[in-house]
């Protein structure tokens, strides 16, 4: 079993690194991604911010999961949503890109999904440890 303190630090480092990857990709005028289906970009936002929400929730909730993780969940989603907002503002200044409120909605939805998954996994792990 990985110690919770180590897992917390790993999630913290990975969340910062993933945020940097998102920023880097947002700085590009175009991304080399083939268009496969309508609204594909929204799915990409959901996945990218789902990973961020997962990692941020892990960094915030560990080393011990509080009895009520709801506050941690919403604070993690808010933090990711604010990062998504800053990313959309950043994209408004990148040639070939623009700020899109629907992208921000997809970012927040992804952050919520990722955060929920992390908290569910942490609750499950906590139950296994106490059994």
Image: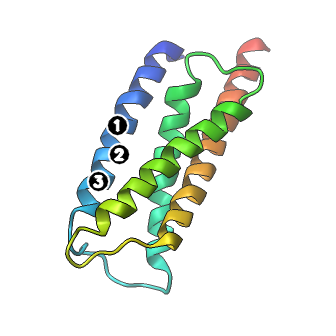
Q: Residue at (67%, 25%) from the top-left corner?
A: 125
Q: Residue at (44%, 30%) from the top-left corner?
A: 11
Looking at this view, is 92 or 19 the one in front? Answer: 92
Image quarter for residue 35? Answer: bottom left
Please, what secondary structure does the residue beneath circle 2 have? helix
Please, what secondary structure does the residue beneath circle 3 have? helix
Residue 95 location, x and y as percent?
19, 75
Q: Along the horizontal axis of the image, is 11 left or right of 24?
A: right
Looking at this view, is 36 or 29 the one in front? Answer: 29
Residue 72 location, x and y as percent?
64, 31
Position of the C terminus, as image quadrant, is top right
Residue under numbered circle 1 = 16
Relative to residue 13, is residue 108 depicted above or below?
A: below
Q: CA distance from mark 1 to mark 2?
A: 5 Å
Sooner in the amino-acid sequence: mark 3 or mark 1:
1
Q: Residues within 10 Å of mark 1 (few under 14, many from 20)?
A: some
Q: Residue at (35%, 45%) from the top-left corner?
A: 19
Q: Residues within 10 Å of mark 3 (few under 14, many from 20)?
A: some
Q: Is residue 112 visible?
A: yes
Q: Are marks 1 and 2 in contact (CB under 8 Å)?
A: yes
Q: Are marks 2 and 3 in contact (CB under 8 Å)?
A: yes
Residue under numbered circle 3 = 23
Residue 29 location, x and y as percent?
21, 73
Q: Are marks 3 and 1 in contact (CB under 8 Å)?
A: no
Relative to residue 63, is residue 74 depicted above or below?
A: below
Residue under numbered circle 2 = 19
Q: Residue at (46%, 46%) from the top-left corner?
A: 52
Q: Residues within 10 Å of mark 2 (few under 14, many from 20)?
A: many
Q: CA distance from mark 3 to mark 1?
A: 11 Å
């Amino acid at each position: 079993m990985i110690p919770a303190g180590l897992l917390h630090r790993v999630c913290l480092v990975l969340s910062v690194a993933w945020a940097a990857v998102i920023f880097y990709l947002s700085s590009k005028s175009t991304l080399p991604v083939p268009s496969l289906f309508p609204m594909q970009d929204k799915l990409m936002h959901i996945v990218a911010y789902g990973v961020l929400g997962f990692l941020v929730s892990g960094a915030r909730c560990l080393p011990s999961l509080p009895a009520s993780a709801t506050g941690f969940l919403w604070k993690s989603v808010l933090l990711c949503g604010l990062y998504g907002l800053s990313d959309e503002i950043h994209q408004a200044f990148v040639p070939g890109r623009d700020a899109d409120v629907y992208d921000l909605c997809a970012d927040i939805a992804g952050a919520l999904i990722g955060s929920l998954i992390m908290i569910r996994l942490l609750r499950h792990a906590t139950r296994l440890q106490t059994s």
